Image (cartoon, rainbow, N blue to C red):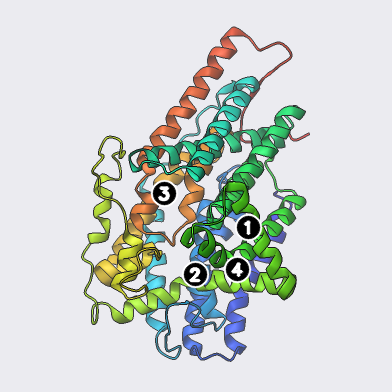
Amino acid sequence: MRRSQPLLRALLLVVMVLPLIVASVVHSPVPFETRVEAAFLWMLCLVPAWMHLSAASGSHRPIPFMPMIGIIYGLYYALGAALGASNEHYKIFLNPGRDYDDAIFVALYGWLAMGLGYLGARMLVSQKATSTPIEVAEVVRRRYGALLMIAGLLLESYRLVRQIPIEIAGILKFVSTLGWFGSGLLVTMATQRRLNFGYRLFTYVGVAAFLLMAVGSGSVANAAFYGAVVFVSAWIGLGRLKFSWIVGAALGITLIISLRGVSEQYRKVVWIAGDGGGVVSRTKLFFKLLHARVQTDGVDGAVSKGFATSAARSANLDLLADVIIRTPSEIPYWGGQTYLSLVGAFVPRVLWPDKPTKELGQAFGHRYGYIGNSDTNTALNLPILVEFYANFGIAGVIAGMFLVGLIYFVLDRTVNNPGQDSLHSLVGVVILIPMANIESDFSLGFGGLILNGVALWLVLRTIRRSGMANNRAGPPLGGRVQQFASHPRTN
């Protein structure tokens, strides 16, 4: 990793400055000054990645969380405008000559406020001491990894074929998330060559089943997040990246993007018409639609359509620009009403059966006229940055993103410290990877953090206690007690 860092930094530098060069030469209806501002924001968004690559040996955080947030933020709010793109959102039409400038500045203020919140907290709080890794027997890690993966697969399968009562839906969804933790645990051991053939086969089949069920549910994004958990878990286990993994990840991303291009056809059949059959049939339908697209448009056409669909569905800068134009002159500030669901976010529905349901995607779409008054099926994502502005304007953006930066620091400090053991890092993977979904509203992104964090902490504590008890009893026949640390053997 250290030997490849100069090359990676050089590549990152090119990626940082290339949009600025393009902004200087491209012909676009977006004004030159606006494109330069967007290119500057893009460079700032990649600063965390530069700092991560420049960190001294042994001081890297095991999960590149803030670099990941910066890249996604830059893709949503900077890169498109820097390259001269405009009017990518499928519901919004803007005047490129004047409508993007304010949105770029609001996104810039938001990014700087978030960075200030993170760095301010980091300077005020002393560096956390690294805890001594706890030895956990391999047999214990395998056992809990397999049990959690099986539980997650069973509950995820049940969720897909049965109507889950709303009182327990949240709990079952979390148990499915524990399956992600189990997956990460087994994948980490597989990369360390600490699984026999039977366990390796079980791990690969389980990972494939999770991915296919995510696709069959129609949630391509969920498949992408699970894939990211598996990828980072393998990275943690081996301590470095293999070229084959990078190629595999690139192919996986291309497939996900291509599937996104036929997602509307899929949802019309499965979600609206109620056809498609069971989980296996729905998964086959998705790939059948993709195959038909490839037959008619070719591979490049299918991928291009997927990129176009992804851009249209994730054009958050267009959404921010439109909300800025229409708020509060046409539509009054929301005044914090979108955050009311946070009141019950820390209480499971099984303990509060009458807890109000969350329908913010519908409310936002109707409020701004993005979906028809009679449309009760379509929901529109409300990104946290747009939500801050829709509620309180630029002051809400600055204060809200500052708070987000503080939360990100707390998460990094709690589950993403240099030198922590890999069990701790896997908890961080399951918690932090979903945080990259910054195109969702605040309560959806952060509302479950405390309950999920406590539950994962209990799972981690249980595994460690079981490992300690196993160690006192002596290693199992044919087994060895291994320290599950951040830098395992890689032979």
Camera-nearest label, 3 or 2: 2
- Amino acid type indicated by mark 2: Arg
| Mark number displayed over residue 29 | none
Whichever of labels 2 and 1 marks the residue nearer the N terminus, that label is: 1
Q: Which residue is mark 1?
A: 285
Give amino acid for label 4.
Gly
Q: Give the residue displayed 52% in from the left and 24% down from the top.
A: 463
For disc 4, the marked residue is: 261
x, y percent for residue 329 = 23, 82
Residue placed at 40% from the left, 89% from the top? 98
- Which residue is rendered at x = 46% and y = 36% of the image? 175
Q: Which residue is mark 2?
A: 313
The residue labelled by disc 3 is 409
Of residues 103 and 402, the one nearer the viewer is: 103
- Please identify the quarter of the rendering in which residue 284 is found: bottom right
Report how far apart the C-alphas of labels 3 and 2 lie in the structure: 29 Å
Q: Nearer the viewer, mark 4 or mark 2?
A: 4
Q: Nearer the viewer, residue 251 or 234?
A: 251
From this viewpoint, is residue 253 visible?
yes
Mark 1 and mark 4: Cα distance apart in space: 14 Å
Measuring from the top left, give residue 375's x and y in whole percent: 35, 68
> Mark 4 or 2 closer to N-term?
4
Mark 2 lies on a secondary structure that is: helix
- Quadrant containing the C terminus is top right
Q: State yes or no: discs 4 and 3 in contact (Cβ < 8 Å).
A: no
In this view, the mark in front (1 or 3)? 1
Instruction: Give the spatial CA distance, label 4 vs label 3.
Output: 36 Å
Measure the alpha-carbon separation of dots 4 and 2.
11 Å
